[in-house]
Image: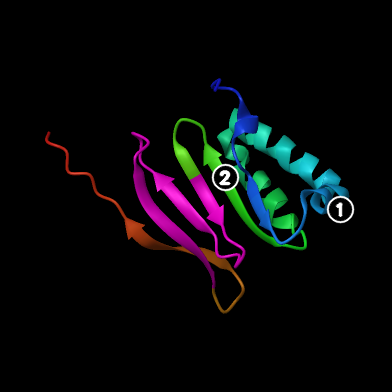
Amino acid sequence: MKKNDLSAFTLCTILGVSAQEVVWQKDTQMATIVTQSHEDAADPTKEAELLLALDAFQPLGMTSKYTYDPLVGITTITPPSGIRELYVYDSANRLKQVQVRERDNAGTYRYKVVKEFRYHYKQ
């Protein structure tokens, strides 16, 4: 696989409907998601726009959504439940934390650390 071949990575998986139904119903949304994915690959600060496009994509079936940074790793996973997991990396691109998005009583989203990784390399 070439380094710049972005079409080789999964953005979402859909269960419970045929591919034909998804394409027929969501053609323009799929194009927006692909465009946002390419923009995020070129400029990682645009990941929020990609996440908004993925959140707007709600086909009839159960959908899991993924974002990633090439040469680093997965950055978010959103299962059908909608509880988003955020993967945080350190400056050496090692997984540092896994955080889960929660909504408080005011309806505001915040992230809670559920896993933390510490690397004990010899200095």
Instruction: Report how far apart the C-alphas of labels 2 and 1 lie in the structure.
Output: 22 Å
Kind of element beneath mark 2: strand
Residue 87 drawn at (x, y percent):
45, 50
Residue 65, given in percent of the width and then of the height, sits at: 61, 52
Q: What amino acid is found at the position of numbered circle 1 in the picture? A: Gln
Seen as rendered, the residue at the extreme left is 122
Residue under circle 2? 67
Mark 2 or 1, closer to the camera: 1
What segment is highlighted magenta in the picture? 75-103
Q: Counting other residues with Cα less than 10 Å from the Cα at mark 1, is it few (<14), some (14-19), or many (20 or more)?
A: few
Position of 103 with respect to 121 (left or right) is right
User: What's the amino acid at mark 2?
Assistant: Thr
- The residue labelled by disc 1 is 25
Position of residue 19 relative to residue 92, above or below, is below
Which residue is found at the position 57% from the left and 79% from the top? 105
First of labels 2, 1 by sequence position: 1
